[in-house]
Amino acid sequence: MTAKSAAAAARATVYGYPRQGRGRELKKAIEGYWKGRVDADALRTTATGLRRDTWQQLAEAGIHEVPTGDFSYYDHVLDTSVMVGAIPARHRAAVEADALDGYFAMARSTQDVAPLEMTKWFDTNYHYLVPELGPDTVFSTDSTKQVAELGEALALGLTARPVLVGPVTYLLLAKPAPGVAADFDPLTLLDRLLPVYAEVLADLRAAGAEWVQLDEPALVQDRAPAELNAAERAYRDLGGLTDRPKLLVASYFDRLGDALPVLAKAPVDGLALDFTDGAAANLDALAAVGGLPGKRLVAGVVDGRNVWVNDLEKSLALLGTLLGLADRVDVAASCSLLHVPLDAAAEHDIEPQVLRWLAFARQKTDEIVTLAEGLAHGTDTIAAQLAANRADLASRAGSALTRDPAVRSRTAATTDADARRSQPYPERTAAQRAHLGLPLLPTTTIGSFPQTAELRAARADLRAGRIDSAGYEERIRAEIGEVISFQEKAGLDVLVHGEAERNDMVQYFAERLTGCLATQHGWVQSYGTRYVRPPILAGDISRPEPMTVPWTTYAQSLTDRPVKGMLTGPVTMLAWSFVRDDQPLGETARQVALALRDEVDDLEAAGTSVIQVDEPALRETLPLRAADRPAYLAWATEAFRLTTSGVRPDTQIHTHMCYAEFGDIVQAIDDLDADVISLEAARSHMQVARELAEHGYPREAGPGVYDIHSPRVPGVDEAAALLRKGLEAIPAERLWVNPDCGLKTRGWPETRASLENLVAAARTVRAELAGS
């Protein structure tokens, strides 16, 4: 095919779309179902309507081929486990009794049965449910969901493409099931899994699918020869099927590297590649393998993970380069639009000039359609859009918001000494123990307590003017008083104020820092029905005034026990925000770190002896390719130390991480030089404690003994058993007792019971240690 005809064939598509609806209707319906206020039929009706509205909006915008199967009640990886029959034995009875309730039990647990482990989806803030597999796993086909959703789209007269998690990525994301040897490799099940995928593909073909997309993002990571061989075998077998739709294998989040020639040679019908900045090497690699003659290329040239408007002329030039490298070149975002908010037009509180710089899912859809139109019919057909885009880009580049000379001077003046504590850890820990006087196995929480309906109503009342600031602060002080009182009665050793005043652990700080924008409707799914509104870091960052000191000092005035000051760290501020793309991440991190350093210093000056700077995103932001990691970890750990290194030796610095794989960043955890780290460990059965021990981690640690992402209350014996397992790896004098994460999403009854059990478990094990 000539470049001219390839351009004429250009079409617009997306890989996936936000699921929640404009008013988060899906969240409300699911949570209503959990509480018994919404029945299953009503939930399904809501879901059907949301899918219909999404597809119709995409089609009306000019998307030629809409995705199906990307919708989920909770998680698309969990949907894949259902599709292939990989139901854990402990959940089979529940699934057989009621498929929907069993599905939610796998995600959230019941009081008697633990859920699947949850962790981050590559380097995003989305969480997936980890498949549990073993040598005895028997796969079976259930394509009901995928076929039904395809049928819904086709019935609307739309061209639709089902999207599935690919078999190689599915197995690479899986872990050995409980009781299975830790060295079991789920990829050995590939030959058992492929016939199930073959049946799903046949079912979709019979239901009217012309194309099916198989997502293989795991192949953008460093992969061993055996893993690449598995990918070659998988797509040789699936591509060789006679009863199948056309296959589009999609990758995103980074460059494909050694996997690109494997997929280019496979007997599939097309590849979808990421061509945004982080994966620009895909262009040279594609040319090096001779392109994709006779195949379809879907080019991800619009950033699906950030919110800035696309440089349309730059993207068109890239698309023009791709012509001739494939039989057909289509235009898409770099990944599913699940990772960005729905519609920037809904943001009425952002200055109109700044709003011009932003593109959420609907605006990105328009950009994709514009690029496809320009590629197919020439730039004259999109002249107006190109002119407007040039003006938007120039507006941002020339704005005073993006550059603050005082901030830049301060970051330029920082030295290595600014990121080092004044004394080494052994001297600090002696001073801290003398100062704090804590018992063996000290108990604490991670920071937040339940965000009740009353607290959310108070914030709404303040925004609406129904109460004034004084009335709002009175409500917050009352909540802090209750939180402190409960912790004292429960017997916790290091208390927290509960974060009643905070809407979100990142947004709260962003609203008090210069250079940050907050949205009103910019919701993005984190997991299940948990949605967040990531701030937008648009300019240089500084802290005009203290952000947490008044609330922390008020809480401390209510108790003689130490109250932790609670801050969100610089890397997590970046990871859980939409960051500026016009300067290196490390530079933005240093700006945030210096702003937070001012807060740490003010907390200490106000008498706070324990300060926690949370960095749950340190692992999730780790580059997917090993070659890119040292540079990232250097600036990331420096930013944390820059935040925390100005305090006295007897001030104890804590950090916290959750829901990620920590084994490959233990050295970085060490390099943070925090005095105490708390980590998620309950669902992974203390795996991180063993990893810390294997590394020789020399500081104090609190691997969680209470899984807060489940509504179940762990018993005293269960928490004590996990604590004993932790003691197998970490000496008692360095072991803390705490939940996995903050308690914001939990209710008060389960929180009270769980923390009382946690304290009782600590006392039980302390007594055992004293008697041994």
Image (cartoon, grey):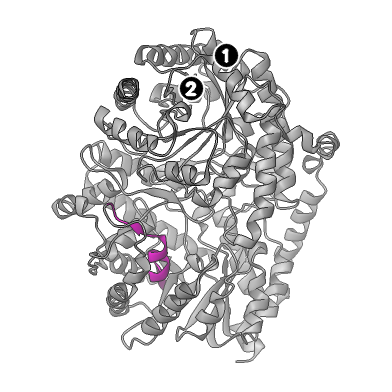
Q: Which residue is mark 1?
A: 435
Say which residue appears at 41% left-offset and 84% top-offset. 236
Q: Position of residue 309 (x, y in %)?
A: 67, 56
Tag 1 secondary structure? helix
Query: Which residue appears farthest toward the bottom when viewing the image?
Result: 1
Q: Name the quarter where the N terminus is drawn.
A: bottom right
Query: Label 1, label 2: how many angstroms apart (C-alpha)?
Result: 28 Å
Q: Which residues are magenta?
A: 159-178
The residue lying toward the viewer, choosing from 616 and 394, is: 616
* x then y, percent, for residue 307: 62, 52
- For the residues carrying marks 1 and 2, which lies nearer the camera in this image? 1
- Is residue 113 positioned above or below 553 on the image? below
Instruction: Inspect this view and state whether residue 514 appears.
Output: no
Rate crowding at label 2 as few (under 14), some (14 to 19) or many (20 or more) other CA atoms within 10 Å. many
What is the x, y in percent for residue 127? 44, 49
Question: Which mark identifies residue 500?
Answer: 2
Asked whether residue 482 appears in the rendered view, the answer is yes
When the figure is inspected, residue 39 is found, relative to residue 721, above or below; the finding is below
